[in-house]
Amino acid sequence: MTYESKLTLPADLLETIAEQGLDALPELVRVIVNEAMQIERQHYLGATPYQRTVERRGHANGFKPKTVETRLGEITFAIPQVREGGFYPQALEKGLRSERALTLALAEMYVQGVSTRKVAAIVEQLCGSEISSSQVSRAAARLDATLAAWRNRPLGEIVYLYLDARYETVREDGQLRDLAILIAVGVDREGRRRVLGVSTSLGEQEVHWRNFLHSLVNRGLCGVQLIISDDHPGLRAARQAVFGGTPWQRCQFHLQQNAQAYVPRQELQATVAAEIRTIFHAPDRATAEAYLAKLVQKYAKTAPRLADWLEKNIPEGLTVFAFPAAHQCKLRTVNLVERLNRELDRRTRVVSIFPNEAACLRLISALLMETDEAWQTGRAYLTFPKDEATSQPS
């Protein structure tokens, strides 16, 4: 069967475009995309509206509204529905992907200090049409608003909370400064990873960490059963102030690295590292503590500083034994955030030095927002039986 489908624009819309020019673009986009989606539905059904044919695969079932944030502002599209299900138009999704790609391109150009005039030239190449510097500035302002809304969105129950910091170089008052970027990642009751928040400051002091953790709680973060992090002094103090009653798992990877500072001879470093790994890989906490006691006794005389450090610090890496065995491998370290940081490094490496703190926050937020969206639609990170997701460890 063959039939023709083509886009047609209403005469009144054409008149509006003639009168208003670019101001009418949102309505033009809405009409074109809506009609393209209807054509896509016709192809999917194998029939035009009201056409009776044996090749028909289903029946049209009206439309559902969907509001999308675009460079032209919010546009509400009419998503065609099929009574039998199984259909979703790709015309809109393709537009959204290119929209996000261009938004990130704008963000990356801005954080590199590219002038609005140069950005306009690049966007003109991307879009095939001229765009003014003021339009680029407005696009950046809308992007900042979108990212700020994402950073302040409501949170809910998070079972496992990972905390870590990274640094980027920025120009501040004509000087190069290290900008601390605090990142919170969690695993929710569905077992999915979530990027919970990000904050920037010229320092990783306790007050920055405390304000950041308070902001997570104020946004509705609750139900945390375990916090996984390194032992940064500012983070420790802030964590104890905000989540004082929540169990804490000190990152085993960083613990193992920290221990090397107390090994008296270089030739012992590999041996001590292997002995610490034996403790961490024990089948249960009782066995791990027995291994630790023997290790402390072994070095009590030959390396007393190491023995004292092991006795005081290694137990902070054993909290994970109180949690489900199937989860322990992913709760031992902050590797979840470290992998995320490596991806951020890859994307920010081209910038080298950010022109200011706001530019850095813009790009980091955009990248984390993209990651969070991908995580929410991907497969679960952990599996929670009902009794494990709702009960505290003993």
Image (cartoon, grey):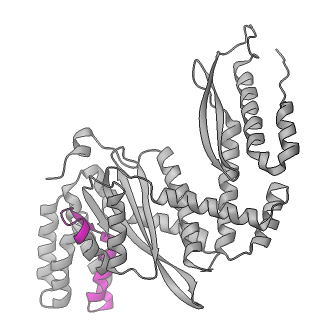
Relative to 213, say whether 223 is above or below.
above
Is 158 left, or right, of 72 in this rendering?
Answer: left
Relative to 10, say whether 118 is above or below.
below
Task: Provide the residue span drawn in magenta.
Answer: 240-268
Residue 66 position, x and y percent, is 60, 37
Is 210 left, or right, of 394 in this rendering?
Answer: right
Residue 328 magenta-highlighted: no
Residue 228 position, x and y percent, is 31, 64
Residue 260 magenta-highlighted: yes
Nearest the eye: 313 or 9: 9
> Does residue 333 appear in the picture of this structure?
no
Nearest the eye: 177 or 345: 177
Is 285 left, or right, of 82 in this rendering?
Answer: left
Nearest the eye: 375 or 255: 375
Which residue is at 58% across, 67% downward? 363
> Does residue 20 appear in the picture of this structure?
yes
Single out the residue that lies furthest toward the front.
19
Residue 325 position, x and y percent, is 25, 51
Which residue is at 26% across, 52% downward? 223
Nearest the eye: 367 or 113: 113
Which residue is at 54% across, 70% downward? 361
Give the quadrant of the N terminus: top right
